[in-house]
Amino acid sequence: MFANTWNNIITWFKDRSERAKLIRSFNESARHAFINGIAPSLLKASMSKGDSAFKHQFSSWLNSGFRIQVFTGRVLTRAEIITIGKVILSDETLVRKLVILGWDTLEVHGDKGTYGCKWQLKDFILLPE
């Protein structure tokens, strides 16, 4: 019993570490893309609560949302937010990493305005039953 609890604690810390690494890597890549003129806006990823209706078998019990904030200095249109979301979701490797690391919701928000969009990550990859 104690060994099982201890293993669960170790796994939890390892998963949190992997999630933090992915966020750092995403933010570093987004910074470089913006600085080099590849991306027109700066993106910044963080964790969020997520949407409990989007849960799947790999969902983290805490902070299951992967939030991307888009820094443009203006209010983004819904079409712009959807386009950014589609670009992220088209990267199947990234989506698989997000799902395996416990995220179930992708959220995209601008730095101005009061709304954003969210997607259920499991809809974009095939998960085992």
Image: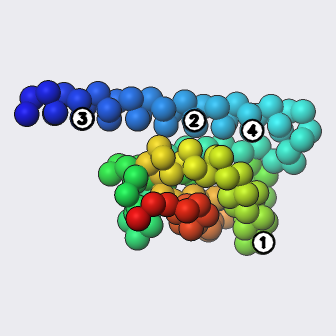
Chain-order first, disc 4 or disc 1: 4
Q: Which residue is mark 1?
A: 79
Q: Which mark is residue 61?
A: none
Q: Which residue is mark 3?
A: 8
Picture coordinates of residue 103, whole percent (x, y): 48, 51
Callout 1 amino acid? Ala
Q: Residue at x 79, y 52 (%)?
A: 72
**Residue 13 in view:** yes
Tell me the SS state at disc 3: helix
Callout 3 amino acid? Asn
Callout 2 amino acid? Leu
State the separation of the CA atoms marked 1 and 3: 42 Å
Q: Nearer the viewer, mark 1 or mark 2?
A: 2
State the separation of the CA atoms marked 2 and 4: 12 Å
Q: Nearer the viewer, mark 2 or mark 4?
A: 2
Q: Which residue is mark 2?
A: 22
Residues at discs 1 and 3 in contact (Cβ within 8 Å)? no
Determine crowd level at label 3: few under 14, some 14-19, many 20+ residues with C-alpha closer than 10 A. few
State the separation of the CA atoms marked 4 and 3: 33 Å
Picture coordinates of residue 33, whole percent (x, y): 83, 37
